[in-house]
């Protein structure tokens, strides 16, 4: 699964990290236009991209995680 999202505030970052930890799979986040990657279960790493448009990559199938991502979806066009 690949999604483009934005986490606008600390509550959104906490929501994202909590859900990333719960699925038990690697969740990789990268800032659109940059080449670095962040572990989605890292609160400090995710705070660094708060308010930025990010790409989320996850190899798992989790309806709960996908539902959470939809709350933060942004149109990438």
Image (cartoon, rainbow, N blue to C red):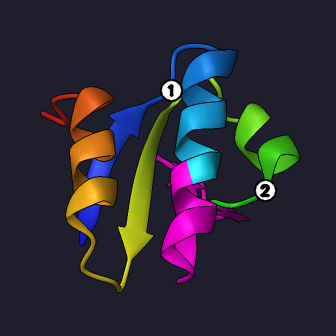
Q: Tell me whether circle 1 and circle 2 mark residues in contact (CB < 8 Å).
A: no
- What percent of the width, then of the height, locates residue 72? 33, 29
Seen as rendered, the residue at the extreme right is 44
On screen, residue 20 above or below 18? below
| Left or right side of 11 for 73 | left
The magenta-colored residue range is 19-39
Determine whether the residue tagged by mark 2 lies in a helix, strand or loop.
Answer: loop
Q: Is residue 48 visible?
A: no
Q: Which image quarter holds the C terminus? A: top left
Tell me what residue is drawn at x 52 percent, y 15 percent: 8
On screen, residue 45 above or below 26? above
Within 10 Å of disc 1 (Cα), the crowding (few <14, some 14-19, many 20+) is many
Q: Mark on residue 59?
A: none
Comparing 60 with 76, the one in front is 60
Whichever of callouts 1 and 2 sits on the residue coming sooner in the sequence is 1
Within 10 Å of disc 2 (Cα), the crowding (few <14, some 14-19, many 20+) is some
The residue carrying mark 2 is: 42
The residue carrying mark 1 is: 7
Is 20 included in the stretch rendered in magenta?
yes
Tell me what residue is drawn at x 62 percent, y 32 percent: 13
| Left or right side of 60 for 70 | left
Tell me what residue is drawn at x 21 percent, y 38 percent: 70
Tell me what residue is drawn at x 40 percent, y 70 percent: 57
């Amino acid at each position: 699964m690949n999604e483009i999202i934005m986490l606008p505030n600390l509550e959104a970052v906490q929501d994202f990290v909590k859900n990333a930890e719960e699925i038990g799979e690697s969740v990789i986040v990268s800032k659109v236009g940059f080449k670095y990657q962040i572990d989605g279960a890292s609160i400090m790493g995710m705070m660094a991209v708060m308010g930025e448009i990010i790409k989320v990559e996850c190899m798992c199938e989790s309806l709960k995680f996908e539902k959470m991502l939809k709350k933060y979806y942004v149109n990438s066009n």
